[in-house]
Image (tube, helix red, strand yellow):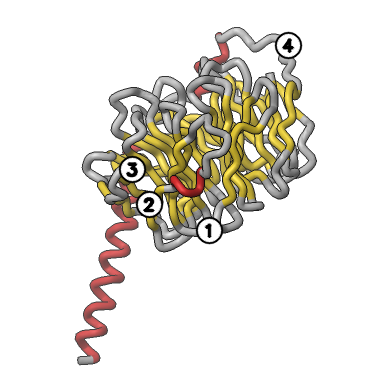
Amino acid sequence: MATEGLHENETLASLKSEAESLKGRLEEERAKLHDVELHQVAERVEPLGQFVMKTRRTLKGHGNKVLCMDWCKDKRRIVSSSQDGKVIVWDSFTTNKEHAVTMPCTWVMACAYAPSGCAIACGGLDNKCSVYPLTFDKNENMAAKKKSVAMHTNYLSACSFTNSDMQILTASGDGTCALWDVESGQLLQSFHGHGADVLCLDLAPSETGNTFVSGGCDKKAMVWDMRSGQCIQSFETHESDINSVRYYPSGDAFASGSDDATCRLYDLRADREVAIYSKESIIFGASSVDFSLSGRLLFAGYNDYTINVWDVLKGSRVSILFGHENRVCTLRVSPDGTAFCSGSWDHTLRIWA
């Protein structure tokens, strides 16, 4: 019996070493395609001019850390969630609160606006993703219409509607992502492959896009096929947790922000990392990233209370935005690209333009 155990261990060790050698060979093949750096190609590109962005609105009303936010497709409304257990829908023009829901748990780590603008989804330490329909009847009890859609075995870290209100994609601390049917609450597809908590996800921008990217505590960013549930690409160059991933507007690349104090750009067609956005002076983790509508700028929120704006092509920092009084943990560019909103542990959201 003991010899059998030994035999198993031996085969396991040999399989492990074989996997490592295959990984090494894959990296070698990848390196062969690595002919030129992005910033070298971009040397001929015009540099960006003077860059001015200011806080235009401050949204106050959360009683604790703001953890997540999302824009409505109408380019005006925002949903935000907080550690105080509240989810608030704001009018970003007037700063008025239009809806508020108190969740049964604190730490509402994920929220999303439905494409139609008629519902919101949220969840966190309750391990669930709940969908609330929005109506303009002020007396209506929103909590009564709550629908629990997704159930994970650990906290919900991110959620996003697909291109319709009917399906929702979730990421969780249980190491999986999952696609759910909103009506029935049925699990349509699950995505296994991360070796630790999944912290973020983003859907490919095209209407027909059947892929999404996720990042997590295993330092990996993985691209998934929603129909098959298979991981189709995987990138492991960060040195710490990946807190945020966001597709480039064309869908051919994505950016990631990590606790290793860098943001990185991965080209999906070249199947490799093409740029690193970092400076010696930046020592705090990047918690959230998003692209400008053109894809030329990358906005990144950091744990040192700042927002850095990077020139995606040249790899240089073009601006640094101050205003928040605690770590910036969520950041999204508005659907029309005219502004972006950041949420912070200082209990506020700011709209910059």
Residue 3 in percent (x, y) is at 21, 88
Residue 144 sits above or below residue 248 on the image: below
**Residue annotated with mark 2:** 150
Question: In this rendering, would 193 be left or right of 129?
Answer: left
Mark 3 or 4, nearer chain start: 4
Provide the secondary structure element on which disc 4 rests. Answer: loop
**Residue annotated with mark 1:** 125
Provide the secondary structure element on which disc 2 rests. Answer: strand
Q: Is residue 260 visible?
A: no
How far apart marks 2 and 3 lie (CA) works out to 8 Å
In the image, farthest residue toward the bottom: 1
Mark 2 or 3, nearer chain start: 2
How far apart marks 3 and 4 lie (CA) works out to 46 Å
The mark lying in front, picked from 3 and 4, is 3
Q: Which amino acid is tagged 2? A: Ala
Query: In the image, what residue occupies the spot 64% across and 52% down?
Result: 83
Residue nearest the observer in this picture, 140 or 207 = 140
Q: Which amino acid is tagged 1? A: Leu
Mark 1 residue crowding within 10 angstroms, few (<14) / some (14–19) / many (20+): many
Residue 309 in percent (x, y) is at 66, 26
Provide the secondary structure element on which disc 1 rests. Answer: loop
Quadrant assignment, res 276: top right
Q: In which quadrant of the rendered image does the N terminus lie? A: bottom left
**Residue annotated with mark 4:** 50
Q: Which amino acid is tagged 4? A: Gln
How far apart marks 1 and 2 lie (CA) works out to 13 Å
